[in-house]
Image: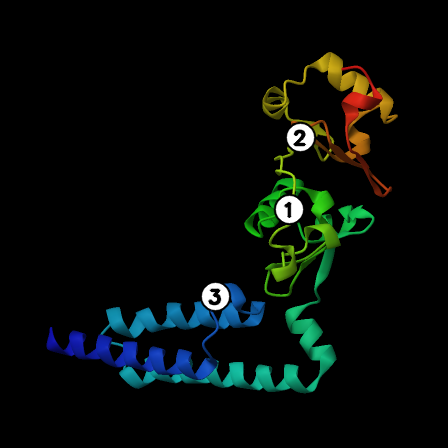
């Protein structure tokens, strides 16, 4: 029992030292190759802990080799832009001044719901608040807001901004979300009027269509820039 306890302590301290040498970045900040190495280290470390037939050195040596590989890759990516792009990829713009970059979303294997979740986590709730949204190489999203939605400065403290209204996504990637229609008291007849107004014959033409309680509509057709209607109630009778 004491031997098992001693092996666990030694492996734990060894892994801790190796991870400290690799840097202090959190899992969410790691590049893909760093995540892979970390997961392999975690898996290899359990083998000599649970199997006393494996010599301790044979358990520690693979961990040391992985840490060495990590340092070599880090040096190479620091020296070479091509290697860095191959190992880590490139940042991808998923929202631009044109609207949602639909092909970029498909390339990242993301859908509209994933995109909505990411912008909500960044405290933005409508696509028209965002000038650029970029998926970084570590998977996190960076957002450049439009000038009117940029964080307030000391000069803006006394500004009277209108209350925000949460938009409800009615059509996402060509599919109708009926539950969201109820939230804004939108029935099929009203929706048909809106689609006719924006000259949409089929839901499949739309990447997204959202509406808030004030009647502001954000929509984007495939292959086109996004468009905004500040108050649909003023343009058509619904």
Q: Is residue 85 left or right of residue 40?
A: right
Quarter holding the N terminus? bottom left
Circle 1 sits in a helix, a strand or a loop, which is it? Answer: helix
Q: Position of residue 119 (x, y in %)?
A: 62, 49
In the image, residue 67 above or below residue 177? below
Q: Which mark is residue 115?
A: 1
Residue 230 position by quadrant: top right
Percent position of residue 134, x then y: 69, 58
- At 81% across and 51% down in the image, what residue appears? 97
Give residue 209's position: percent from left, percent from top.
Answer: 73, 32
Q: Which residue, given by chain and number where applicable, does mark 3 sit on?
A: 27
Instruction: Return the residue at label 2.
Output: 212
Q: Earlier in the sequence, mark 2 or mark 3?
A: 3
Mark positioned earlier in the residue sequence (3 or 1): 3
N-terminal of the pair, mark 1 or mark 2, is 1
Q: CA distance from mark 3 to mark 1?
A: 21 Å
Q: Are there few (<14), some (14-19), or many (20+) residues within 10 Å of tag 1? A: some
Q: Position of residue 85 (x, y in %)?
A: 70, 73
- Pointers 2 and 3 in contact (C-beta within 8 Å): no
């Amino acid at each position: 029992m004491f031997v098992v306890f001693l092996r666990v302590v030694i492996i734990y301290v060894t892994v801790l030292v190796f991870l400290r040498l690799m840097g202090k970045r959190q899992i969410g900040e790691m590049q893909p190759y760093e995540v892979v190495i970390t997961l392999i280290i975690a898996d290899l470390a359990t083998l000599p802990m649970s199997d006393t037939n494996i010599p301790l050195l044979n358990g520690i040596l693979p961990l040391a080799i992985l840490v060495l590989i990590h340092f070599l890759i880090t040096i190479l990516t620091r020296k070479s832009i091509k290697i860095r792009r191959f190992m880590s990829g490139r940042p991808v713009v998923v929202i631009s001044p044109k609207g949602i970059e639909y092909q970029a979303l498909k390339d990242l294997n993301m859908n509209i719901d994933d995109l909505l979740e990411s912008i909500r986590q960044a405290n933005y709730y409508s696509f028209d608040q965002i000038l650029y949204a970029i998926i970084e190489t570590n998977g996190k999203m960076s957002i450049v807001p439009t000038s009117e939605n940029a964080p307030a400065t000391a000069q803006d403290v006394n500004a009277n901004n209108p209350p925000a209204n949460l938009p409800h996504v009615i059509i996402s990637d060509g599919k109708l979300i009926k539950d969201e229609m109820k939230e804004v008291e939108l029935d099929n007849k009203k929706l048909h009027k809106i689609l006719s107004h924006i000259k949409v014959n089929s839901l499949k033409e739309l990447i997204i269509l959202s509406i808030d309680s004030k009647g502001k509509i954000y929509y984007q057709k495939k292959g086109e820039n996004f468009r905004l209607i500040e108050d649909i109630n003023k343009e058509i009778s619904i």
